[in-house]
Amino acid sequence: MLLTLLKSKIHRVRVTAVELEYEGSCAIDADLLACAGILPFEQIHIYDVNNGERFTTYAISAPAGTGTISVNGAAARRVAPGDVLIIAAYAQMTQEEAQGRSPTIIHVDQKNRPLNISPH
């Protein structure tokens, strides 16, 4: 049996842009993706702290060091620039693989720069 567990979380990033006419996805600063171990085109779950919206999309890489968090396509209607988001990635693993595993949690500052990275 496979279990679905939290792999990584980018906690309380701020939306910097919304692009309704884009194909879809969420552009995330490449530094944050690397810290979280999230790959381009990997499925992510987004939780908007401001309005309670929750949706699934995929990550794409934005230029490193920019702090970019751009929600694109149809999901752009669910957030607004400045909204605070939690971005989560999950992984499926066996119970044996899950034993002793901790997710990576990234906390950020007001400009979406990593403050600390910790296995939780």
Image (cartoon, rainbow, N blue to C red):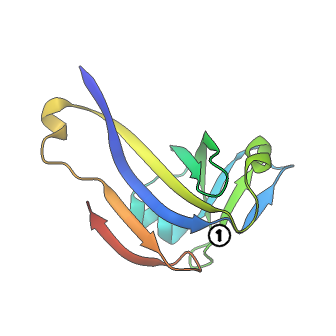
29 vs 57: above or below: below
User: Residue 75's spot in the image, x, y percent?
Assistant: 73, 44
Q: Residue furthest front?
A: 51
Q: In which quarter of the image is residue 36?
A: bottom left
Q: Which residue lies furthest to the right in this view?
A: 21
- Residue holding disc 1: 68
Please tell me which residue is depicted at 23% across the width and 19% down the height of the picture. Answer: 1
Q: Can residue 33 be seen in this view?
A: no
User: Residue 56's spot in the image, x, y percent?
Assistant: 59, 39
Horizontal side, residue 34 vs residue 73: left or right: left
Please tell me which residue is depicted at 74% across the width and 47% down the height of the picture. Answer: 78
Please tell me which residue is depicted at 65% across the width and 45% down the height of the picture. Answer: 53
* Disc 1 crowd, CA 10 A, few/some/many (<14, 14-19, 20+): many
Front-most of 71 and 34? 71
Please tell me which residue is depicted at 36% across the width and 62% down the height of the picture. Answer: 105
41 vs 79: above or below: above
Number of numbered discs visible in the structure rendering: 1
What secondary structure is marked by label 1?
A: loop
Horizontal side, residue 48 vs residue 96: left or right: right
Q: Is residue 26 visible?
A: yes
| The C terminus, quarter of image | bottom left
User: Residue 35's spot in the image, x, y percent?
Assistant: 40, 66
Front-most of 12 and 38? 12
User: Residue 45's spot in the image, x, y percent?
Assistant: 53, 44
Q: Which amino acid does label 1 sit on?
A: Thr
